[in-house]
């Protein structure tokens, strides 16, 4: 029997393992979710919202176990308390706007005609969730999908093997009906077979570009709706009128938090030349004085290991290639003795970089950030757009009109001004180019998890 194994980045041990479900068994589970969907959708919206909120509340009660599990599975330090702030904020917002977002559009209600457009659930929604923010990224789709009347099938990353199981248990203990929300342990082959068989009505995937391409290929010809959030290489641009200390603090946190393993983490920085020297000096001080690499189970640790040795290997390779091509690393390795050449990877700040280097082109997804000086908005804009990805961009200035003008020209999903690495549930979370397509959260998120259905009712007249 094939098993899925979560290898802990803390010590390389097998932290959890589960058998891979046979495709026929998984298909039968999906069919049970399909049968449960009709009754679930018939329940009043207020009842569905209450049950979903209860499920999230029950998950909150498991916080102590969840935080420790996350440290063991993917290396996030326990000092940060898991992901419950974001989980709760997103759940509450989507619950609050559900009635408005799902309300029918009434065209006419007269003695002769009733014409309206309703939002109806797709049916069975398949959520393939990543390991880097395993609860928040899943919640982005699970909560609105259930509220909208879909049933949900969750497949989680092997690196965070226990998350889907725990989420489903929390919702079941809170009273969610059987088969409305299920978790499957699948390998790539089983996942692709279910998708190619047209088992789902909508699929939301968060992960690599390669993973998104595999899902698109598997879904080809099934006409299954897809939402894809894939890679990122998010830029920041610090203009000459920016609040320097504020910019350094937020942007460096956006680059290093979670060991740099954030979908919208900052990976490349462009700084107006008058501020460049001071920005670099402060960025180096921010790293050397504020970060402690170590065991994520220890409270003093601020940066834990990367989730997997192979992820750290890729960041080391990009960094080494850049250094060999003329870049300079400003962080002394002696300051981070916990770097073991494996999953524990020291943070690094690179300068003298160019866009010929992979570290400025390919997704790094680790604790390395590269900084370049620029001489104009036009130069910064060209460099920000010189990228295959488009998720977020962070602009730093006191001039909102200037930020809006530049933001309109950036090929990205979200433009931030004086902020970075944050997901606002009131705004659509979306990307462009190789970052994918579709959008989650906000009213648009509800629209993507439902389909329009029109009613044109002609009444009998006298």
Image: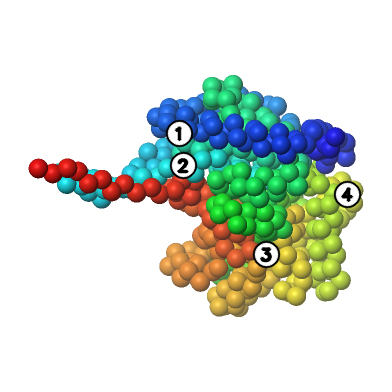
- Residue 348, how many percent across, how many down? 78, 58
Asked which quadrant contains residue 173, the reply is: top right
Relative to 58, residue 300 above or below: below
| Disc 1 crowd, CA 10 A, few/some/many (<14, 14-19, 20+) | some
User: Cβ–Cβ below 8 Å for labels 2 and 4?
Assistant: no
Mark 3 or mark 2: whose residue is earlier in sequence: 2
Sequence-wise, the earlier of marks 1 and 4 is: 1
Residue at left 70%, top 49%? Answer: 192
- Give the label, 1 or 4, closer to the camera: 1
Q: Which mark is residue 268?
A: 3
Q: Earlier in the sequence, mark 3 or mark 1?
A: 1
- Which image quadrant: the C terminus? top left
Q: Between disc 2 and disc 1, whose residue precedes?
A: 1
Question: Circle 4 is placed at which residue position?
Answer: 342
Asked whether the residues under the numbered discs 3 and 2 touch, taking CB atoms below 8 Å apart as contact, a structural biologist would say: no
Query: Is there a contact, CB below 8 Å, between mark 2 and mark 1?
Result: yes
Residues at marks 3 and 4, CA–CA distance in whole angstroms: 24 Å
Q: Badges 1 and 4: C-beta atoms under 8 Å apart?
A: no
What SS does tag 4 mark?
loop
- The picture places residue 411, in percent across and down from the top left corner, at 55, 68
Q: Residue at x 70, y 56 (%)?
A: 214
For marks 3 and 1, give the CA distance.
45 Å
The kind of secondary structure element at disc 2 is strand
**Residue beneath label 2, please?**
121
Residue sitting nearer the eye, 348 or 307: 307
Report, in whole angstroms, how far the alpha carbon at label 2 lies from the one at label 1: 8 Å
State the CA–CA distance, disc 3 to disc 2: 40 Å
Q: Is residue 233 left or right of residue 462?
A: right
Along the line of sight, which residue is nearer the eye, 59 or 123? Answer: 123
Q: Provide the residue designation for mark 1.
A: 41
Please tell me whether residue 170 is drawn above or below residue 343 in the rendered image. Answer: above
State which mark lies toward you, 3 or 1. Answer: 1
């Amino acid at each position: 029997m094939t098993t899925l194994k979560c290898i802990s980045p803390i010590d390389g041990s097998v932290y959890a393992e589960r058998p891979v479900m046979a495709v026929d068994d998984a298909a039968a589970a999906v069919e049970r979710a399909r049968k449960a969907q009709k009754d679930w959708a018939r329940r009043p919206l207020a009842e569905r919202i209450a049950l979903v909120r209860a499920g999230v509340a029950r998950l909150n009660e498991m916080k102590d176990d969840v935080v420790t599990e996350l440290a063991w599975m993917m290396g996030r330090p326990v000092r940060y308390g898991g992901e419950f702030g974001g989980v709760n904020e997103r759940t509450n917002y989507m619950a609050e706007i559900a009635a408005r977002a799902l309300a029918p559009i009434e065209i006419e209600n007269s003695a002769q005609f009733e014409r309206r457009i309703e939002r109806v659930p797709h049916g069975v929604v398949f959520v393939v969730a990543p390991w880097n923010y395993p609860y928040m990224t899943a919640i982005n789709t699970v909560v609105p999908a259930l509220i909208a009347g879909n049933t949900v099938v969750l497949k989680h990353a092997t690196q965070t093997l226990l998350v889907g199981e725990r989420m489903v248990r929390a919702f079941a203990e809170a009273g969610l009906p059987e088969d409305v929300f299920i978790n499957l342990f699948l390998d790539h082959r089983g996942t692709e077979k279910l998708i190619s068989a047209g088992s789902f009505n909508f699929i939301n995937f968060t992960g690599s570009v390669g993973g998104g391409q595999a899902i698109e290929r598997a879904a080809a010809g099934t006409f299954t709706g897809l939402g894809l959030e894939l890679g990122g290489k998010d830029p920041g641009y610090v203009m000459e009128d920016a609040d320097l200390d504020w910019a350094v603090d937020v942007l460096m946190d956006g680059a290093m938090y979670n060991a740099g393993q954030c979908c919208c983490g900052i990976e490349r920085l462009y700084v107006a030349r008058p501020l460049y020297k001071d920005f670099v000096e402060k960025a180096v001080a921010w790293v050397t004085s504020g970060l402690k690499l170590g065991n994520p189970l220890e409270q003093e640790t601020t940066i834990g290991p990367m989730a997997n040795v192979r992820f750290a290997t890729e960041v080391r390779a990009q960094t080494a290639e850049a250094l060999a091509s003329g870049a300079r690393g400003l962080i002394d390795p002696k300051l981070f003795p916990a770097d073991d050449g494996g999953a524990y990877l020291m943070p690094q700040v690179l300068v003298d970089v160019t866009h010929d280097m992979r570290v400025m082109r390919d997704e790094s997804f680790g604790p390395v950030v590269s900084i370049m000086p620029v001489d104009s908005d036009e130069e910064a804009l060209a460099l920000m757009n010189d990228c295959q990805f488009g998720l977020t961009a962070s602009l730093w200035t006191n001039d909102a009109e200037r930020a809006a003008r530049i933001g309109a020209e950036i090929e990205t999903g979200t433009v931030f001004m004086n902020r970075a690495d944050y997901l606002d549930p009131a705004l659509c979370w979306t990307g462009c180019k190789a970052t994918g397509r579709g959008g989650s959260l906000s009213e648009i998120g509800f629209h993507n998890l439902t389909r329009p259905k029109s009613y044109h009712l002609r009444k009998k007249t006298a």
